[in-house]
Amino acid sequence: MRAFISSFQYLFNPGALQIPQYYGEELAFFNIIGEKYFNTMIILITSFLIAIILSLVVSFLYIKSNEKIKRTFSSFFFVLESVPDVLMVIILQFSFVMVYKFSGWSLGITAITNDGSLYLLPIICLSVIPTIQLFKYFSSYVEEEQKKTYSEFLKAKGLSENYIIVFHLFKNSLIQFISQSKNIILFMLSNLLILELVLNIDGLMGFIKTYGIGDHRILMWCLILIYLPFLLFYKSIHLITEHRTSNGGSRNGA
């Protein structure tokens, strides 16, 4: 009961949270996590958006392809999905080093040994598997929509295949797709912890591992800060969808 009351108090007064440092002093919670939070959210949000955009693009190419190319797509993604996260980091890091060696383009790889502020490598690593998972979700939804009567009706009206895919099949599958994408966030958070440790990134997940596991108040506020942007994103999508649905219903009723 005391723990619950303490958490409730700190929920409305996070400024009172003090983090003990190794040299004996204590620093305020928000004075410590600013840069860590920024680093983590840049990587997490950018990876999430890239995964959504790439999955939509790849789904379009997949649906337009013949059966042979579809099998190639599936085999390639199966191999990628089977690669362990740590091995993926090592392969990409090695690729970055080889690019730098032969072309002189650093691609931000030098930031690993300087200040830990590298973004490109963890963003790529973190977006690969979510892209594949979201692609599977979305392509299956679109293929289900293709089997419905209205799809054949639109073809009979003479509408182009690209138009039907983008403005009807994609549109009707998008709500289910956005709903399923919520499950990806938890997966990305667990992988982000691994990336922060392997690449020595000064991020919020490492901070939670150090301080949050033993202090539920710190863990509570870190989780709130992580999920708040996504809560706003999904709430906005929900409101936009409701608005368009109600407007569409009004026009149909008129």
Image (spheres, helix red, strand yellow):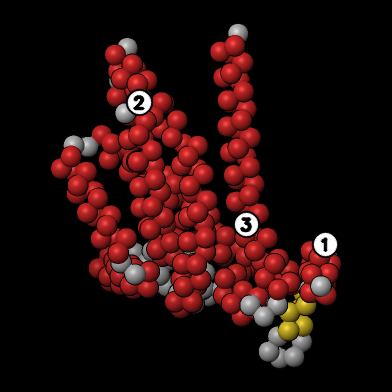
CB within 8 Å, label 2 to label 3: no
What is the distance, in whole Å, between disc 3 and disc 1 at their CAs? 17 Å
Q: Which residue is mark 1?
A: 12
Q: Secondary structure at mark 1?
A: helix
Residues under labels 2 and 3: Cα distance? 36 Å
Q: Where is residue 158, by image quadrant?
A: top left
Asked if marks 3 and 1 touch (Cβ < 8 Å), the reply is no
Give the residue at mark 3.
Answer: 227
Q: Looking at the picture, which amino acid does disc 2 mark?
A: Lys
- Residue at 73% in and 84% down: 20
Q: How many marks?
A: 3
Instruction: Spot the residue most to the front.
Output: 1
Q: Helix or strand or loop: what does disc 3 sit on?
A: helix
**Neighbourhood count class around disc 1 (C-alpha, 10 Å): few under 14, some 14–19, many 20 upward:** few
Q: Would you name the residue on which mark 2 appears?
A: 148
Would residue 100 be seen by someone viewing this image from the given angle?
Answer: no
Q: Nearer the viewer, mark 2 or mark 3?
A: 2
Name the spot of residue 133 as percent of width and height, x first: 38, 52
Secondary structure category for the residue under label 2: loop
Mark 1 belongs to which amino acid?
Phe
Sequence-wise, the earlier of marks 2 and 1 is: 1
Q: Residue at x 58, y 38 (%)?
A: 237
Residue 132, percent across and down?
35, 52
Relative to 53, is 129 above or below? below
